[in-house]
Image: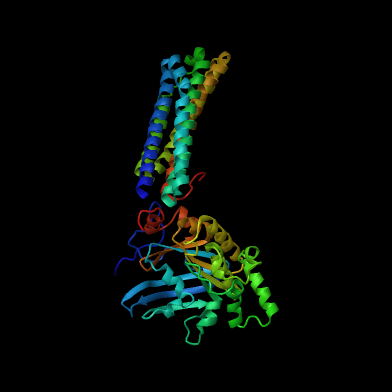
Amino acid sequence: MRRRLEREIEKIKNEVLCLGAIVEDRFQRAIYAVKTGDQALAQHIMDTDFEIDQREIEVEEECLKILALHQPVATDLRFLIAVIKINNDLERIADYACNISKRFIISFQDSRLFKYDYAPMADQASKMLRKSLDALVRMDVDMAYDVRDMDEVVNAMRNDAYEIMKKDIQDQPDKVGGIINMYLISRHLERIGDHTKNIAEEVIYLIEGEIVRHR
Amino acid sequence: MPETPTLIKRKNQLVDRNVRETVGQSTVADPRMRCLNVSVYYNFGEKKAINNVSLDIGQNEVIAMIGPSGCGKSTFIRCLNRMNDTIDGCRMEGKILLDETDIYDKNIDVVPLRARVGMVFQKPNPFPKSIYDNIAYGPKIHGLVETRHQTDELVEQSLKRAGLWDEVKDRLNQPGTGLSGGQQQRLCIARTIAVNPEVILMDEPCSALDPIATAVIEELINELRQEYSIAIVTHSMQQASRVSQRTAFFHMGDLIEVGPTDQIFLSPLHQLTNDYITGRFG
């Protein structure tokens, strides 16, 4: 029975990693769409979000099945609890990729007015996501703690964007709506950073058995 | 000087599987029984079954003893009412105190001791007598009842506390052995509580029962906790997690870890505990 449980856990781990890779690709492409003005790509990201939702449900169902059939305890139980939460965080990150796409589409006409390069911010969020999932695979608590620190960088970038937005609004008061919409992309990226931080904190819980959120 | 292994949980690290000292809090604020440095030998000292175990059993708590077969958990609870005295070549070292009295003191009479520390076994073992006599026998020989009326009352009360009264009140004169397995086990529990014990030891009390009878016994254990201290040996991890407030994990005669049950099953401190409860060995 132990082997069967191990196989199931390994399978779930792979599914979560796969979901993580897809989600990362989504928000990177959303930012690419903003940068290149590619409306079709942005629309495509919104139209295919259901795929992520479906995967999220599949992973959750797998976890619930294991909980019911194997009644795991200790590290196995903590792993499943962590995965259920991480799964949810990943789905929320994909939602933010949709939100970024949506903001870009509705402000397309004004998107060039707000001059902030989101690529470095998206790269930082990508790094955080990859590192938090690496920490899960390698059960490396130091990596998970690093992700928490990296979140500060994303927050600082959002503050930069805010300062630029304030200046842009002063320069172009007739375009306030479009500028705010484009600024909100930084807010979405910042929230993506927060969710990767959550993932890292779940990994810390998994390894150390201690809840470190809100500390 | 050899380096002593640390017993404090470090971040990101379970206590190494080679550490044999007990991890966790083995004492409680309000102990009913205290076991101090208990070691048990079988075969006239040839085999050491328990190695220097110290553990408190608190008042009004259920403490579960878990561990792989042969780890010493049954041997340990059998020390608590000197059941091991009956085994030829078995010797015990250390101290076991019941309400601060050493139960291995030479002046202690084991018959009243075994009434104060009662035991329920794996297989229900009612006496080949009527349901009524199964309960009445103990109180009679211990002089707890004098009149027929008192006996009737005690029998009824004990059967009620064991949750069996409604099922047997109309057939008290029928043999106890005619009851179902679960009912027989509750009869044995009623028999144990009839002599007004302080501690009840249970050695895998549900292993011969179906899930429904098991659930009834577990419910009963939880209720009995209000009045007694209960030490239960179980092979069922789920049972330990359902019924106990503290769990002690034994391995090859050592008490490896003891702690609150929720902590043991969610975040154990010792690698061996984690490996055992997650089914990696045992």
Q: Residue furthest bottom?
A: B107
Judged left or right of residue B12, residue A99 is right
Please name the residue shown 36% across and 41% down the image.
A10
Residue A140 x, y percent position in the rendering: 36, 45
Q: Nearer the viewer, residue B105 or B220?
A: B220
Number of numbered callouts drawn: 0
- Vertical relation: A129 (above or below) B279: above
Q: In this rendering, does residue B95 appear at all?
A: yes
Please name the residue shown 37% across and 49% down the image.
A1
Please name the residue shown 53% across and 59% down the image.
B214
Q: Residue furthest top?
A: A109
Q: Nearer the viewer, residue B235 or B94?
A: B235
Residue B199 x, y percent position in the rendering: 55, 72
- Vertical relation: B103 (above or below) A122: below
Q: Nearer the viewer, residue B241 or B11?
A: B241
Residue B90 x, y percent position in the rendering: 38, 79
